[in-house]
Structures are given as C-alpha cells and as structure tokens.
Amino acid sequence: MAGAGIIENGQMKVAARQVRKGEEGSASLRGCQENFIIIDLVIRNTSDKSIIYKPNLTSLTNDAMDFLGPLDYTDLYDFEDLTRSMDRVHDST
C-alpha cells in the first residue's frame, strides 16, 4: 500500500501509514490534515526488553532527499484528552 511501511524482526514490529482524509477520527486532526502529514504508528514489542521511541529523532525524506524533521505536538494529544474529559465533568455551581 502506498504511504505505508512495516519493519519486523524477531523482537519487534513497527508499522507506519499515512492517515488519509476521512480517517482522522477527531476534529483537531481534521484541522491539521490540510497542512501536515499525519502518521499512524504502531510499535509492537515481542521481546523481553524495553523499546523506546523518540519522535524528535524521526525524520522523513522525499524524492529530492530533503530532510523533513518532525514537529512535536504532544500538547495536541493532551488537548484531545481534555476535550473528551470535559463531557464527563459536571459543573455544580
């Protein structure tokens, strides 16, 4: 499949694919779809060791071999969690 890749050995499996329009799952991600590439990344550890993934060390290249560094939007995930939590919060005032 174009826009997807899998790396696997006896100890781990890493699968990455580009999230296409209509697959975003949240309004925040839909808003990012126009200007950013959203990647669905799954890391499965089948070993007895720890695997550490550091997004800041991830890079993409294109056909011109341009280096494309990641942007860290960890706060976006926190915002998504907060938005979901707001539905459960009761205002008793």
Image (cartoon, rainbow, N blue to C red):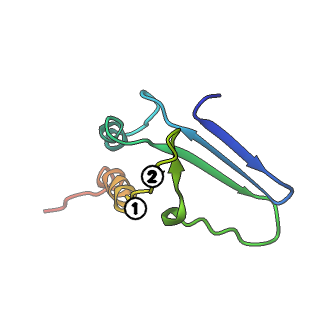
Query: What residue sits right under mark 2 in the picture?
Result: 68
User: CB of mark 2 within 8 Å of CB of mark 1?
Assistant: no
Circle 1: residue type: Thr
Query: What residue sits right under mark 1 in the picture?
Result: 74
Q: Position of residue 53 (x, y in %)?
A: 60, 65
Q: Quick one: which residue is furthest to the left in this view?
A: 93
Front residue of 54 and 26: 54
Callout in the foreground (2, 1): 2
Q: Position of residue 34 (x, y in %)?
A: 32, 35
Which secondary structure, mark 1? helix
Badge 2 crowding class, 10 Å Cα cut-off, few under 14, some 14 to 19, many 20 or more, is: few
Q: Earlier in the sequence, mark 2 or mark 1?
A: 2
Q: Quick one: which residue is furthest to the front in this view?
A: 64
Classify 53 as above or below 7: below
As measured in the structure, the alpha-carbon distance from the residue carrying label 2 to the one carrying label 1 is: 18 Å
Front residue of 68 and 35: 68
Front residue of 80 and 42: 42
Residue occupying image coordinates x 33% and y 42%: 32
Q: Quadrant of the C terminus?
A: bottom left
